[in-house]
Image (spheres, rainbow, N blue to C red):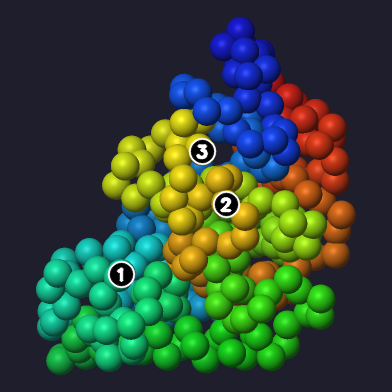
Amino acid sequence: MTLVAVMAWLLLRPTDAPAPASGGAVFAPAWPSPFAPTHAPGPPEGSASTKETEADGAPAPVSGARFRIFPGATVADVLRRLAADPRLTHDLADAHAGDLMRRLGLGDGHAEGQFLPDAYHIGSRTTASGILREAHDRLRTALAYAWRGKASGLPYTTPEDALIVASIIEKETACAEDRARVAAVFTRRMHKGMRLQADPTVIYGLGERFSGTLTRRHLTMDTPCNTYTRHGLPPTPIALPGVPSIEAALHPAVTASLYFVARGDGTTEFSDTLAEHNAAVRRYLR
C-alpha cells in the first residue's frame, strides 16, 4: 500500500457520521459511506462496447432498425441520442427531463426513470416522441407487474419508491448476482432510519458540476438528491433502471448486510458491521 493510499484511508475511512466538510479527492474504495460503487463508469451510453439486452436481460434482437435505450442511461442521455439519430423524425427540440412528460402528453411529472430500457423498432415515420411514449408504456406495465408480486415488508409506500431504489441499484452495480444484495443493504438502512449514502445520488444531483471525480466536498454539497445530506429517497429516480434492477428492488436478498465495497473486479464485498466493512476497505484498498 502506498503512503498516499494509507493516508487516504485514514482520512476517509467509512463511518456512520456525516462526511467531513473539507475538500480533496476521494479514493474510490475508501469513500466515507457504507459502500462504494461496485464498478467503474462504463463506456459511453450507446457505444459499441455496451452490452445490448432486452428489458428482461435477454439479448436484444439484431434484425431490423432499432433504437436502444440502455439500462443506467439518463433521460438527458437518451434525448441526446434521439436528436442525433438520422433515422428518426425529430419532434422534441429543446426538450429536457423537467418538461418532457408534458411534451409527450403524459402529465407534468419529472421524466427521469420513466422509460424502460429496451430495443425499439424504427419504421419509416418513427418519431422521437413515439419511441418515448412506447418506452413509457412499457415501463408502467413492467413496474405494475413487478409491484403486484413484490416481497412483503418492504419500506416502500408506492411503486415510485421502488423505481427510485431500482435506479440507484442500476448505477451501483453491473453484476447481476449482486443486485438483490445491494437492494437488501438499501432496504435494511431504510428500515433502520439510516441515510442511504449512495454516491450515484450525489453525482446525479451535481449535474453538470460533476467532472468525473467525486470529492469529499461533493458529499456535503446539499441537493435534493444527495443521500448523504438528506434522509430518505431522492425525489425522482436518478437513471433509467432495467427490469432486473426493478425486480431486485422489490425482491431484496435476505441478508444482514448494511455495507458494501467494490472488490475491483466488478463484484462486491458485503459486510454486516462497520468493523467488517472497514477491514474490507483496507483489504481492497491494499
**What residue is shown with label 2?**
230
* Kind of element beneath mark 3: helix
Q: Nearer the viewer, residue 133 or 192?
A: 192
Residue at 64% of width from left, 85% of height from top?
Answer: 146
| Mark sitting on residue 219 | 3
Dot 2 crowding, Cα within 10 Å, few <14, some 14–19, many 20+: some
Lower sequence index among marks 1 and 3? 1
* Kind of element beneath mark 1: loop
Dot 3 crowding, Cα within 10 Å, few <14, some 14–19, many 20+: many
The image quadrant that residue 157 belongs to is: bottom right
In the figure, is residue 257 to the left or right of 97?
A: right
**What residue is shown with label 1?**
97
Q: Amino acid at mark 1?
A: Ala
Say if 216 sits above or below 155 in the image: above
Q: Nearer the viewer, mark 2 or mark 1?
A: 2
Lower sequence index among marks 2 and 1? 1
Residue at 48% of width from left, 55% of height from top?
Answer: 225
Residue at 17% of width from left, 78% of height from top?
Answer: 92
Where does the image place residue 188, in percent across and percent down from the top left?
Answer: 78, 59
Q: Are marks 2 and 1 in contact (CB under 8 Å)?
A: no
The image quadrant that residue 68 belongs to is: bottom left
Q: Amino acid at mark 3?
A: Leu
Where does the image place residue 132, in percent across and percent down from the top left?
Answer: 31, 82
Where does the image place residue 221, in percent across and percent down from the top left?
Answer: 45, 40
Q: Nearer the viewer, residue 263 or 140?
A: 140
The image quadrant that residue 114 belongs to is: bottom left
Q: Nearer the viewer, residue 56 or 214?
A: 214
Q: Amino acid at mark 2?
A: Arg
In the figure, is residue 202 to the left or right of 248?
A: left
**C-alpha distance separating marks 2 and 3:** 11 Å
Where does the image place residue 50, in percent across and percent down from the top left?
Answer: 41, 58
Dot 1 crowding, Cα within 10 Å, few <14, some 14–19, many 20+: some
